[in-house]
């Protein structure tokens, strides 16, 4: 293990080299950075960090999340990119104060229905996984402004995606999409949309209803006369 960095409620940044050192102040921790430590599991004491707002587990070897993570009801930012997670627990939806979720470059194949309970989520990063579909409950993420799910294995998008009316940036490039739902026209705040490198044969006319769209990329789709082009 290298170093662990945390910030307590007084705003002081502390650096530790052992778990037992940090356990002494577990109730005071609001930010915990345990990235790049080759962790295969999170420490048990994390269940007592009830005031934790930011948890950074990037660049480890985590294959699953402990049951204790459900206790982190005040968590606002969870970063766990470049790990080996194959699934999220059903209780993940308990983290209802979560605003930023980064699970880029894991081994996820699906998301639990409970993810729709994360109503405060603003940014979600899911690129570089093996996700085949999004649950219909995904449309409940009505606070979402940025959605990155590029480089997965999505076959379709749920019709409920049209409920994400605050969405500004949406990247679903590098998937296996054959079509886009008509409800995408409901994304009135959408400014940037990338659906490149899919299997799209057409673009729904409803997309023209997204009046704020200024960047639309659809490179390398089998649409007549549109390969390698960018519109808007």
Image: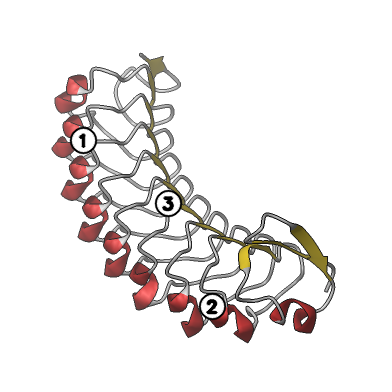
Q: How far, Cα to Cα, is label 1 from label 3?
A: 23 Å
Q: How far, Cα to Cα, is label 3 from label 2?
A: 21 Å
Q: Quadrant of the C terminus?
A: top left
Q: Which mark is residue 64?
A: 2
- Pointer 3 with pointer 2, Cβ within 8 A: no
3 vs 2, front mark: 3
Which one is earlier in the sequence, the residue at label 1 or at label 3?
3
Q: Residues within 10 Å of mark 1 (few under 14, many from 20)?
A: many
Q: Residues within 10 Å of mark 3 (few under 14, many from 20)?
A: some
Identify the residue position indicated by label 1 in the image: 184
Q: Secondary structure beneath disc 1?
A: helix
Q: Position of residue 121 (x, y in %)?
A: 37, 51
Identify the residue position indicated by label 3 in the image: 99
* Rendering quarter of residue 59: bottom right
Which one is earlier in the sequence, the residue at label 2 or at label 1?
2
Q: Residue furthest top?
A: 232
Q: Secondary structure beneath disc 2?
A: loop
Q: Depth check: give the residue in front, 198 or 32.
A: 32
* Rendering quarter of residue 213: top left
21 sits left or right of 160 in the view:
right
Which one is earlier in the sequence, the residue at label 3 or at label 2?
2
Q: Residue at x 27, y 43 (%)?
A: 178
Q: How far, Cα to Cα, is label 2 from label 1?
A: 33 Å
1 vs 3, front mark: 3
Q: Residue at x 43, y 30 (%)?
A: 220
């Amino acid at each position: 293990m290298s170093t662990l960095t945390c910030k307590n409620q007084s705003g002081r940044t502390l650096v530790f080299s052992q778990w037992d050192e940090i356990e002494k102040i577990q109730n005071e921790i609001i930010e915990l950075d345990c990235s790049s430590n080759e962790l295969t599991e999170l420490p048990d004491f994390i269940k007592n960090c009830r005031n934790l707002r930011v948890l950074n587990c990037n660049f480890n070897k985590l294959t699953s999340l402990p049951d204790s993570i459900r206790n982190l009801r005040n968590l606002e930012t969870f970063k766990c990119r470049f790990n080996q997670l194959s699934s999220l627990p059903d209780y993940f939806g308990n983290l209802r104060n979560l605003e930023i979720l980064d699970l880029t470059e894991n081994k996820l194949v699906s998301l639990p229905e409970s993810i729709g309970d994360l109503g405060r989520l603003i940014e979600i990063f899911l690129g570089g996984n093996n996700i085949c579909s999004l649950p219909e409950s995904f449309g409940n993420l009505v606070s979402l402004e940025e959605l990155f799910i590029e480089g997965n294995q999505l076959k379709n998008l749920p019709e409920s995606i049209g409920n994400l009316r605050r969405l500004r940036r949406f990247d679903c490039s590098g998937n296996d999409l054959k079509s886009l739902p008509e409800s995408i026209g409901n994304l009135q705040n959408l400014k940037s949309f990338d659906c490149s490198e899919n299997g799209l044969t057409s673009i729904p006319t409803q997309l023209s209803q997204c009046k704020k769209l200024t960047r639309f990329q659809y490179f390398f789709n089998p649409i007549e006369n549109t390969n390698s082009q960018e519109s808007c």
